[in-house]
Amino acid sequence: MTTRSFALAFTKPHSPLAVLARIQRLRQIGGPRYRGLFIRWHHAQPNSTSSGEQSSRRAVGLYPQGHKRSRSFQDTRPSIPPERPSAIAQPPDYQPPITGLISYLPKSWIPYAELARLDKPAGTYYLFFPCLFSTLMAASYTHAPPLAVFETAALFFTGALIMRGAGCTINDLWDRNLDPHVARTRLRPIARRAVTPFQGLTFTGFQLLAGLGLLLQFPTSCLYYGIPSLLLVATYPLAKRVTHYPQFVLGLAFSWGAFMGFPALGADLLSDPVAMKAVATLYASCISWTVLYDMIYAHMDIKDDAKVGIKSIALRHEKETKAVLSGLAVVQTGLLATAGWILGSGPAFLVSVPASTAATLGLMIWKVRLKEVSSCWWWFKYGAWFTGGGISVGLLAEYLAQASETGHESTLAPSAWKELVMGHSSRLNT
């Protein structure tokens, strides 16, 4: 019969009674073979600690009945190799912000401001730009007066700020058990338990109510286009668990503003097939853009995502990322040019917008270093302004060029524009 030996190591001295209790437990669960266990005390070799101090551990040798005693006790435990340092540097412990807008907020408000990502506005800009693209296209198409265009754009920016915050809160509620295991997200308010899930859910309710109140400032038809986007906002975090292409679902949600500019300026998409085709093409172009920049963003968490089981297009196409990014850039640029062509845009659009889009996306794809978190974050943060800003300037130039030619001869009746502009002004003042 094969004999076995055991060693119990104690980091603190234990009384003989405690050791005897442990032996009795082994006898009970080990059967007849271990009824004859006996004890031999041994002082193990000193181990060096990280501070240079010496410490010793008291060990107990346990032997089954029939085993021949040896004069020297040998620790038969397998040696454990030293733990390797983590490949991803863990962020420091949480420190309240000392710079930026939210540093001036009351201390109890800061977790909610962080939950809404007020300290990281890049996502708000990405959500706002499709709304701005659609508004400027609609302004050129309907020859809207400048005041209506400005007020509509201001409302859209406020809506993007609110709804992006709501989307981030929903995302953090879904990921509350995953974020603590990811280096970049482990200090988010819910992950570090500064906000409870119930408080986060309540905060989401207030954000959605605020978004609904803002949506009511637009023409009534915007309600029918705006409300369905909430379903996409709520399902994106779930998509990360079931598909390698959650960025596509994010694109459906973040690009929804492409539908909003035309009805906000009084154009009826359902009765105007030209406008509907242009909007659908613009929407597809913005989806391509969203997948592109979020694929770069996903590379910041690619190692942690693989560990915790989160899926992303960056993981699925890690070895050919830049080829995929290049394809998405071509699709976005082509669809954007097609949208302008459908609306009959002039040279100001057809020359500047596709050219600036191709140039800024090409520069980003060429320069970004996907293995470096800081590089991915820099291009994600400023890429919104490079690409989105260039498109917006081109669309604004087209609007001003058409306004100078037509003198704002609107496709809507003057009374309709007066009602629209006065409606915006009265709602903003209430």
Image (tube, helix red, strand yellow):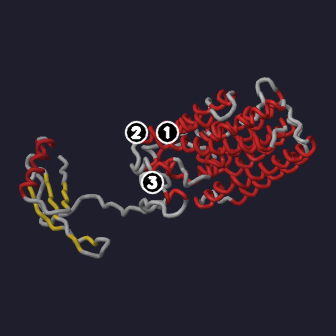
The answer to which of marks 3 and 1 sits earlier in the sequence is: 3
248 versus 114 height, above or below: above
Q: Nearer the viewer, mark 3 or mark 1?
A: 1
Amino acid type for the residue under numbered disc 2: Phe
Amino acid type for the residue under numbered disc 1: Thr
CA separation, marks 3 and 1? 19 Å
Residue 16 lies, in percent from the top left, at 7, 58
Residue drawn at (41%, 47%), measured in percent from left and top?
195
Asked if residue 129 lies left or right of residue 298, the reply is right
Badge 3 element: loop
Question: What is the quadrant of residue 342 in the picture?
Answer: top right
Residue drawn at (79%, 37%), measured in percent from left and top?
138
Badge 2 element: helix
Marks 3 & 1, CB-CB < 8 Å contact: no
Amino acid type for the residue under numbered disc 3: Leu
The quarter of the rendered structure image containing the C terminus is top right
The front one of 409 and 116 is 409
Residue 283 lies, in percent from the top left, at 73, 37
Q: Nearer the viewer, mark 2 or mark 3?
A: 2
Marks 1 & 2, CB-CB < 8 Å contact: no
The front one of 218 and 69 is 218
Residue 189 lies, in percent from the top left, at 44, 50
The answer to which of marks 1 and 2 sits earlier in the sequence is: 2
Residue drawn at (45%, 54%), measured in percent from left and top?
187
Residue 229 lies, in percent from the top left, at 62, 33
The answer to which of marks 2 and 3 sits earlier in the sequence is: 3
Q: Which residue is mark 3?
A: 187
Q: Which residue is mark 1?
A: 204
Q: Which mark is residue 122?
A: none
Q: Which mark is residue 198?
A: 2
